[in-house]
Image (cartoon, helix red, strand yellow):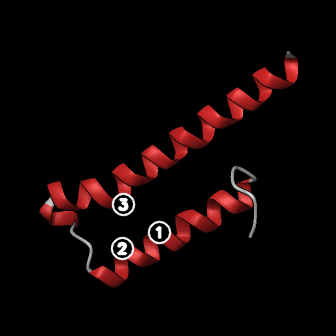
């Protein structure tokens, strides 16, 4: 039972991080034209967030 709660908590953390990342990298630049990213900048942002997630342990390394 305790292991299931830990797994569920971890899943909620990962989903929260992914949602925040999507808002920060995809939605906000489209809404706020002052912060619009070019295509390379957007891919670099995804790469930085992915590296941060892997290093934090939220996602397993490939």
Instruction: Name the residue furthest right.
Output: 2
* Left or right, 22 with reference to 59: left
Q: Which mark is residue 25?
A: 3
Point out residue 11 in the picture as x, y percentages from the top left corner.
Answer: 65, 36
- Crowding around mark 3 (Cα neighbors within 10 Å: few <14, some 14 to 19, many 20+) is many
Residue named by callout 2: 42
Element assignment for label 2: helix
Circles 3 and 1 in contact, beta carbons < 8 Å? yes
Element assignment for label 1: helix
* Left or right, 19 with reference to 23: right
Where residue 50 sits, quadrant-wise, is bottom right
Q: CA distance from mark 3 to mark 1?
A: 7 Å
Q: Tell me: residue 58, above or below residue 52.
A: above
Where residue 37 sits, quadrant-wise, is bottom left
* Left or right, 14 with reference to 36: right
How many numbered discs, if any? 3
Residue named by callout 1: 46
Q: Tell me: residue 62, above or below residue 54.
A: below
Circles 2 and 1 in contact, beta carbons < 8 Å? yes
């Amino acid at each position: 039972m305790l292991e299931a709660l830990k797994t569920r908590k971890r899943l909620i953390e990962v989903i929260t991080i992914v949602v925040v990342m999507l808002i920060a990298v995809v939605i906000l630049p489209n809404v706020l034209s002052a912060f619009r990213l070019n295509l390379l900048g957007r891919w670099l942002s995804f790469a930085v967030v992915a590296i941060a997630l892997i290093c934090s342990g939220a996602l397993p390394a490939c």
